[in-house]
Image (tube, rainbow, N blue to C red):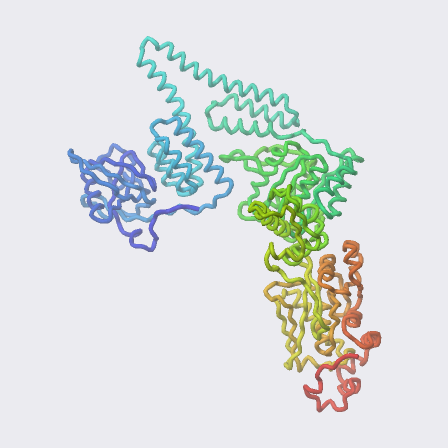
């Protein structure tokens, strides 16, 4: 991001020539207001002409200040366009002028030299820069150094730092600080010609450090000189005072070095680390205490000494206590809880178990992050969390090399330092939200961090030392696995955390959310009670999510309204929230529940779908119209779902004779397949059998049982294939009032994850073939006879291709030549 006062390049102001005022021993920066005393006739002429025009003038420094009549070669090519704020003629013939710098320009050509210079120029815009963490650190370092410089230099007003502190644009910050410094002309001109704000800030930081050292020494010498001027007889005493101050500074520095040396010898670290710190300390002893390099080395030694190289917390290996802790904090989530207890069991049995790297994958709000905190409590380990969402720079993980100004370790090492032990529970939150750009791929850097075979020697760029991460329990969280690179997935043990059922949400609300909100709203002394039916209504009519975040918000909203009633002095000190009173607190229902049709319908089948917010009912509608065989698909369907619809149509055409249909029915009718809620995208193959059922129902005018729902992918041979998200789909069917749920036979093994109350409330029918689906879903007089008919080939394939009369005979038609659309209309199955 960069600022600019320059006019648009397409405007006349940016192209016309302006008078030039050569400056001696001064450089004017953009936004800088400075008084100038002008005595040369050509310079006064340039000012007068600028005042007669629009009060703008080009300000450029002379290369040498001892030239009274500069030529074109004596003036720098880069200057600043300034605005004349005030002009005052003095009695001695000179002129005092107050100018404000506007923007940088490059002098392209000297177009006139009559009385004064006129120049053609091009405005210069600084290149745009993105303010990232590294640039923020650099800006903060520049502000801090400038504050020190202001404290040392009495010639700069104290409010100058206040002005600098408010600037958050790198370009403005660099120009404002540069304008305040007492620099050589060449240094200031170099800063003016440095267009990149980042490079300008780096150069500026180095110049400020030099100025601070010079200013500190100057002040010491100034005090000594002042003392000598006041009393010549105190020359020896003043000299001693100066030497004493220098000795005091050296003494403090020596004490710091001695303290560091003691810490290095006492600190328990690997031998390689100890030797590196001894070498760095030896270098530091040979440096000046005020030098910038000494500060860098000192900070490096401090950071390495603060790291927990061998400091560890003792694991709590009591399985029962750990289980009680996990149960107290979270309801359900059996799989991750069992995995943590297994880890503790292995820790108690094995001396050196391998590193543990888990990845909790699930929708938002199911408790992935809070589960990490509970694991830390259960295992008696320190807890540290690092959010990876939005990280695009590899240096955020591995750190910056010490050659960069403001360099520091990466987030991994800094988090370990924050944890205070080398075996914390380290939560890497939102690992699926990392991305890559020109600065590197942080996911690649994570490969070393999350590899138990490599992370015992993780090397941070800043430390340049091996750090052992093998004792850390890494826990990653993600909403989806797809964005995570495959090599990174391979290094983690994935544990899926599905969404909660309505019953589970009610239990979580009663046990955790209601007490938490009552405490946070100060209602501990008030009798507030939520009935299970009230929470169930909130879950089904006011939230639509896999987790419980919105449920907690709605419960909190009710508690806040109760708190208001208490404060306003209502007499009731007891509040019972029932299902019928929920709308009085939360208003009308936000969502309509998934409910099945009241009657059996033709061409309408109940499907179920998985979403990030849990399972939902998904109705499929099919209608038949006269046409030319078009298949119309609507409802914002994805590519996979459209392919599944075409496969369903192919299956029906292949089974046309068995279904009592003309094999050429598709040539005279159009089929329209629609999934309601067309604004929501839908995709996946699991609606294959649902679409076949709706198509057959519409073509044969046979109703579909309203209490039946189904899910399953269809093959062209009619096999019903396995689908995902079975638990959520069965919960949605149960919630919607479905009585029979048809599932693929390979999904039977997934039923163990389904809550018992859902399995008791549904008749779950595993199916291997599409024929069985139709026999169970369609409202038939004799399902067994229908199924037997479907399973027998009626006409050999060669007859199907060539003998139209035989087809008509099978279908009970006398004359195929008189066929028309009315005679081929769909017939109801019996």
Nearer to me, 190 or 516? 516
Residue at the image position 33 percent from the left and 45 percent from the top:
105
Would you say 547 lies left or right of 151 here? right
Looking at the picture, how far across and down is residue 523, in whole percent? 62, 43
Looking at the picture, how far across and down is residue 294, in whole percent? 50, 26
Residue at the image position 63 percent from the left and 71 percent from the top:
633
Residue at the image position 75 percent from the left and 47 percent from the top:
334
Looking at the picture, how far across and down is residue 338, in whole percent? 76, 44
Is residue 389 shown above or below 822? above
Is residue 713 shown above or below 401? below
Nearer to me, 762 or 821? 762
Nearer to me, 234 or 284? 234
Would you say 221 lies left or right of 92 here? right
Would you say 156 lies left or right of 403 here? left
Q: Quadrant of the C terminus?
A: bottom right
- Quarter of the view holding residue 460: top right
Is residue 301 shown above or below 455? above
Residue located farthest toward the front when viewing the structure as drawn? 571
**Residue 485 seen in this snapshot:** no
Residue located farthest toward the top when viewing the structure as drawn? 233
* Number of marks: 0
Looking at the picture, how far across and down is residue 701, in whole percent? 72, 78
Is residue 114 shown above or below 214? below
**Residue 259 seen in this snapshot:** yes
């Amino acid at each position: 991001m960069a600022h600019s006062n320059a006019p648009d390049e397409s405007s006349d102001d940016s192209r016309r020539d302006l008078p030039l005022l050569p400056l001696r021993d001064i450089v004017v920066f953009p936004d800088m207001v400075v008084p100038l005393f002008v005595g040369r006739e050509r310079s006064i002429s340039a000012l007068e002409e600028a005042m007669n025009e629009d009060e703008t003038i080009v300000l450029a420094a002379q290369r040498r200040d001892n030239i009274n009549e500069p030529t074109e070669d004596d003036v720098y090519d880069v200057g600043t366009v300034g605005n004349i704020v005030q002009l005052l003629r003095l009695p001695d013939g000179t002129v005092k002028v107050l100018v404000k710098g506007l923007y940088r320009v490059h002098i392209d050509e000297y177009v006139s030299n009559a009385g004064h210079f006129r120049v053609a120029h091009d405005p210069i815009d600084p290149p745009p820069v993105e303010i990232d963490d590294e640039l923020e650190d650099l800006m903060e370092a520049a502000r801090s150094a400038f504050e020190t410089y202001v404290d040392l230099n009495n010639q700069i007003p104290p409010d100058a730092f206040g002005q600098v502190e408010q600037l958050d644009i790198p370009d403005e910050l660099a120009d404002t600080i540069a304008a305040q410094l007492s620099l050589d002309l060449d240094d200031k001109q170099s800063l003016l010609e440095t267009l990149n704000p980042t490079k300008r800030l780096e150069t500026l930081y180095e110049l400020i450090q030099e100025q601070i050292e010079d200013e500190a020494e100057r002040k010491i010498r100034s005090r000594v000189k002042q003392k000598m001027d006041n009393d010549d007889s105190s020359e020896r005493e003043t000299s001693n005072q100066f030497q004493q101050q220098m000795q005091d500074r050296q003494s403090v520095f020596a004490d710091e070095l001695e303290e560091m040396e003691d810490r290095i010898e006492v600190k328990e670290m690997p031998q390689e680390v100890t030797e590196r710190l001894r070498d760095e300390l030896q270098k530091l002893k040979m440096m000046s205490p005020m030098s910038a390099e000494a500060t860098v080395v000192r900070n490096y030694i401090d950071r390495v000494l603060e790291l927990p190289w061998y400091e560890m917390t003792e694991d709590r290996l009591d399985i029962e206590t750990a289980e009680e802790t996990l149960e107290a904090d979270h309801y359900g989530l059996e799989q991750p809880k069992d995995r943590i207890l297994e880890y503790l069991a292995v820790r108690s049995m094995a001396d050196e178990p391998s590193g543990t790297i888990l990845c909790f994958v699930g929708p938002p709000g199911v408790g992935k992050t809070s589960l990490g905190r509970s694991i830390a409590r259960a295992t008696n380990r320190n807890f540290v969390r690092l959010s990876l969402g939005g990280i695009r720079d590899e240096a955020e993980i591995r750190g910056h090399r010490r050659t960069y100004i403001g360099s520091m370790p990466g987030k991994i090492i800094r988090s370990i330092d924050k944890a205070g032990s080398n075996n914390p529970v380290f939560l890497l939150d939102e690992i699926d939200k990392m991305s890559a750009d020109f600065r590197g791929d942080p996911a690649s850097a994570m490969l070393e961090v999350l590899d138990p075979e490599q992370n015992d020697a993780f090397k941070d760029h800043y430390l340049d030392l091996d750090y052992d991460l093998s004792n850390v329990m890494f826990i990653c969280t993600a909403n989806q696995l797809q964005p995570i690179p495959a090599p990174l997935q391979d290094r983690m043990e994935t544990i899926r955390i599905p969404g909660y059922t309505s019953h589970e949400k009610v239990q979580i609300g009663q046990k955790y959310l209601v007490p938490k909100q009552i405490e946070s709203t100060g209602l501990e002394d008030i009798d507030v009670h939520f009935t299970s039916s009230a929470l169930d209504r909130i879950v089904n009519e006011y939230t639509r999510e896999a987790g419980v975040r919105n449920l907690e918000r709605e419960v909190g909203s009710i508690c806040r309204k109760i708190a208001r009633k208490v404060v306003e002095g209502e007499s009731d000190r007891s509040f019972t929230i029932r299902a019928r009173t929920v709308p009085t607190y939360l208003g009308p229902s936000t969502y309509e529940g998934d409910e099945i049709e009241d009657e059996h319908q033709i061409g309408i089948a109940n499907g179920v779908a998985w979403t990030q917010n849990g399972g939902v009912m998904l109705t499929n509608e099919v209608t038949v119209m006269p046409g030319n065989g078009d298949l119309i698909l609507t409802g914002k369907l994805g590519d996979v779902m459209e392919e599944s619809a075409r496969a369903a149509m192919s299956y029906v055409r292949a089974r046309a004779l068995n279904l009592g249909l003309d094999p050429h029915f598709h040539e005279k009718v159009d089929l329209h397949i629609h999934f309601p809620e067309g604004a929501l995208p839908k995709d996946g193959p699991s609606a294959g059998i649902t679409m076949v059922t709706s198509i057959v129902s519409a073509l044969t005018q046979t109703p579909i049982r309203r209490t039946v729902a189904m899910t399953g992918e269809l093959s062209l041979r009619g096999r019903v294939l396995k689908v995902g998200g079975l638990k959520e789909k069965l919960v949605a069917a149960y919630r919607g009032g479905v009585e029979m749920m048809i599932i693929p036979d390979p999904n039977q093994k997934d039923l163990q994850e389904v809550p018992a109350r859902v399995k008791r409330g549904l008749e779950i029918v595993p199916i291997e073939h599409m024929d069985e689906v139709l026999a169970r879903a369609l409202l038939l007089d004799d399902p067994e006879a229908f199924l037997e008919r479907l399973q027998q080939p009626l006409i050999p394939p060669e007859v199907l291709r060539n003998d139209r009369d035989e087809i008509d005979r099978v279908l009970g038609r006398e004359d195929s030549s008189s066929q028309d659309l009315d005679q081929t209309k769909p017939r109801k199955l019996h």
